[in-house]
Image (cartoon, rainbow, N blue to C red):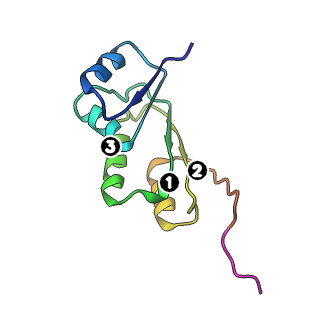
Amino acid sequence: MLQLLLITGGNPKAQKESLKSGLDIVAGTLGSIVRLVKTGGLSLDAIRFSVLHEADSFAEDNMRDIMFLYQKIPSRNRVQTLLFSAALHSLEIKDLAEKIQSFPTWIDLKGKQSVPE
């Protein structure tokens, strides 16, 4: 059975206690994950997968948070990162992929927008 913790704006002390019990999946907003890592409540030593949803909506502050998290992952770990974005072809998404992914594979379900002739 998988153990899951959803990190919310709730009681951080209770969430830290849950993290000590060993989890398979931790889900939360970028800010809540960063807070737990900064306070020592969440270690990224054993991370194997990362999912960033709506990656195109990350502002500059969020990009700093993402880079902070990825710098906390030991270099020996090969983390599979999934980026989901409606704006797949944006420069920001391509830059982010280059920074945090080793061999990105692009799956485009929509295609580039174009004006028909």
Q: For residue 71, say whether it is visible.
A: no
Tell me the number on the disc at residue 104: 2
Residue 107 rendering spot, x and y as whole percentages: 67, 53
Please tell me whether residue 114 belongs to the stretch shown in magenta. Answer: yes
Residue 40 rendering spot, x and y as whole percentages: 24, 27
Residue kind at label 1, given as amino acid type: Ala
Q: Distance of mark 2 from mark 3, alpha carbons?
A: 25 Å
Relative horizontal placement of residue 45, taking residue 109 as reference (left or right): left
The residue that appears at 55% across and 55% down in the rendered structure is: 85
Q: Which residue is mark 1?
A: 97
- Name the quadrant of the C terminus: bottom right
45 or 13, which lies in front?
A: 13
72 or 38, which lies in front?
A: 38
Residue 67 rendering spot, x and y as whole percentages: 35, 48
Q: Which residue is mark 3?
A: 31
1 or 48, which lies in front?
A: 1
Where residue 6 sits, quadrant-wise, is top left
